[in-house]
Image (tube, rainbow, N blue to C red):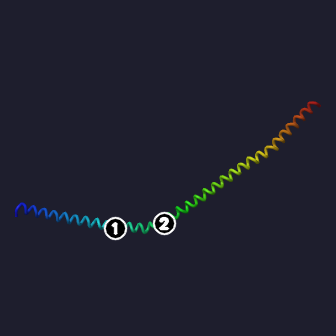
């Protein structure tokens, strides 16, 4: 056996070992991919309905938020009307009070002047 034959045998053995190692790695990778696919299908089966419920809940929450905005707008309008009515009532109530004060002041002044005259 010459050096070239020995080299050919060694290279062949190395190639066969490398191919066996590559096949083992690819087999392991294939098994991992199948397991990953099963896990993803299981997750999709379990999470799919939950995601659907979550979407429905989000839509319901969005509807309720719109309703609350409408209610807040109505409350703001009612508050504005109540403030206007309160200001008008205070103004209307102040007019008789001012007249009573001025009349009382006039009567007091007249009473003081009549007392001084007597």
The reply to whether the C-beta atoms of the residues labelled 2 and 1 are less than 8 Å apart is no
Image mark for residue 52: 2
Task: Pick the residue in front: 81 or 109.
Answer: 81
Image location of residue 50, percent across then percent down: 47, 66
Q: Is residue 73 above or below residue 9?
A: above
Which residue is identified by label 1? Answer: 35
Q: Quadrant of residue 103?
A: top right
Instruction: Work out whether mark 2 precedes mark 1 in sequence or the reverse, and give the earlier one.
Output: 1
Which quadrant of the rendered structure holds the C terminus? top right
Residue lying farthest top? 117
| Numbered disc in front, either 2 or 1 | 2
Image side of residue 117 versus residue 91, left or right: right
Answer few, some or many: residues within 10 Å of disc 2's Cα (few below 14, many 20 plus, some between 14 and 19): few
Q: Which label is found at residue 27?
A: none
| Residue at point 45%, 67% (across, down) | 48
Task: Give neighbour class at mark 1: few <14, some 14-19, many 20+ (Cα, 10 Å).
Answer: few
- Residue under the point 39% across and 68% down: 41
- Extreme residue toward the left, this view: 1
Compared across the picture, whether 54 is left or right of 24 comes to right
Residue 11: percent from left, percent from top: 13, 62
Secondary element type, mark 1: helix
The image shows residue 30 at horizontal and vertical percentages of: 29, 67
Which residue is pictured at 53% across the width and 63% down the height?
Answer: 57
| Residue 101 spot, x, y in % from top left | 83, 40
Q: CA distance from mark 2 to mark 1?
A: 26 Å
Quarter location, residue 74:
bottom right
**Circle 2 — which element?**
helix
Is residue 56 or residue 25 the one in the foreground?
A: 56
Please tell me which residue lies in front, 3 or 111: 3
């Amino acid at each position: 056996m010459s050096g070239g034959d020995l080299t050919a045998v060694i290279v062949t053995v190395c190639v066969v070992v490398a191919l066996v190692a590559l096949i083992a790695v690819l087999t392991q990778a294939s098994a991992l991919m199948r397991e990953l696919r099963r896990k993803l299908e299981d997750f999709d089966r379990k999470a799919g309905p939950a995601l659907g419920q979550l979407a429905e809940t989000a839509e319901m929450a969005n509807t309720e938020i719109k309703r609350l905005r409408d209610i807040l707008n109505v409350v703001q309008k009612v508050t504005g009307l109540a403030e206007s009515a309160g200001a008008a009532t205070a103004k209307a109530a102040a007019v008789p009070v001012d007249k009573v004060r001025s009349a009382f002041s006039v009567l007091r002044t007249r009473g003081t002047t009549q007392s001084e005259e007597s």
